[in-house]
Amino acid sequence: MATPNNLTYTLSIVIPVYRSALILPKLVKQIHSEMCKEGLDKCFELLLVNDCSTDNSWDVIRSLAAEYSFIKGISLRRNFGQHNATMAGLNKASGEFVVIMDDDLQHPPQAIGGMVRALQSGCDVCYTRYKKRKHACWKKLGSQINDWIATRLLNKPKGLYLSSFKALRRDVVREIIKYDGPYVYVDGLILDVTRSITTIDIEHQSRDEGQSNYTIFRSLSLCMGMATSFSVLPLRMAAYTGMLLATMSLVMLIYVIVMKLAHPELPAGWASLVVTVLFIGGVQTLCMGIIGEYLGRTYLKLNRKPQFVVAATTENNDPQ
């Protein structure tokens, strides 16, 4: 695969890093070995984005960059999250093809060559699909919920698993990085840009060290971000719910008036009144919360809340 004249590299590999100091040396060696097998060792770059890790990941990245010329390290000033850190790497990537993968060695570097070949066949994006996932049950359930939401809110093709291990053509990356909002969901941006997507099956490896950095709260936050950043369906559901309740209230009002006229001796229903007020109040609060989420995100974007802030790179350790 020849390197085009207007690009520095054929392949860029972007890896957001958080609490993976012990894993990084082994990960880099495996990637380098696979790139040598694929004949890409002279025309690929590895971008390691330190998402303000609480361990010494940045020191390890700097050490690896001094040892391997293909490594470019980027350190963010604070923890912005996996998707924002990925965007920081995509903004620096210059390859004809760009692979995004995790830092925990659960994504086998041996699959990178197959992903690149899938893009060379003409597809814009290549996702990976695990033959057998080695995640906790709650994480598998969360992925199923996320898949269900993405199918309905983002019009995700059925059967497509939105894996964090994927490869993109340069044209797609160029469109994705135009997004400057503070709340990033990379897969949502991909689905906004193209539907020319393929998948390949891979083996899901066990995590080499430590535990996953994703918690239930962070997974729920990601789902909320996906729902409110790329779709107005929650607002429509709130509107439909309001119209349904208004219709039900009108019907109940007519019913109460008719029953009172027909049976004046019936006592006032205190319990039913309290239940109705609490139900309607709860739905109103939920709808106001959804609207507030949209308004809050709009407010932060208008005030130019940063998507990420680079503190230093291995090419230039001075603050940027």
Image (tube, rainbow, N blue to C red):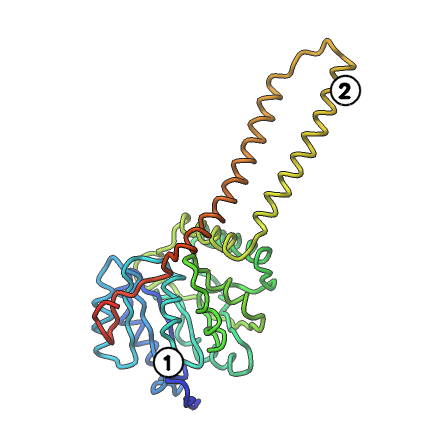
Residues packed near mark 1 inside 10 Å, few (<14), some (14 to 19) or many (20 plus) = some
Amino acid type assigned to the residue bearing label 2 in the image: Val
Mark 1 residue element:
helix
Which image quarter: residue 82?
Answer: bottom left
In percent of the image, x 65 and y 14: which residue is there? 268
User: Residue 67 in the image: x percent, y percent?
Assistant: 22, 79
In percent of the image, x 29 and y 58: which residue is there? 78
Q: CA distance from mark 2 to mark 1?
A: 78 Å
Q: Is residue 203 above or below residue 307?
A: below
Mark 2 residue element:
helix
Using the image as rendered, state which of residue 52 and residue 26 is in the foreground.
Answer: 52
User: Residue 134 in the image: x percent, y percent?
Assistant: 43, 60
Q: How many numbered dots are placed on residues in this image?
A: 2
Looking at the image, the residue that sits furthest to the right is 262
In percent of the image, x 70 and y 34: which residue is there? 247
Residue beneath disc 2:
258
Using the image as rendered, state which of residue 5 and residue 215 is in the foreground.
Answer: 5
User: Residue 43 in the image: x percent, y percent?
Assistant: 36, 85
Residue beneath disc 1:
34
Looking at the image, the residue that sits furthest to the top is 265
Amino acid type assigned to the residue bearing label 1 in the image: Glu
Which image quarter: residue 239?
Answer: top right
Using the image as rendered, state which of residue 28 and residue 91 is in the foreground.
Answer: 91
136 horizontally vs 147: left or right: left
Q: Is residue 98 above or below residue 17?
A: below
Circles 2 and 1: CB atoms closer than 8 Å: no
In percent of the image, x 45 and y 65: which residue is there? 179
Question: Which dot, 2 or 1, sits closer to the camera?
Answer: 2
Q: Is residue 267 above or below residue 258?
A: above
Quarter placement of the C terminus: bottom left
Quarter placement of the N terminus: bottom left
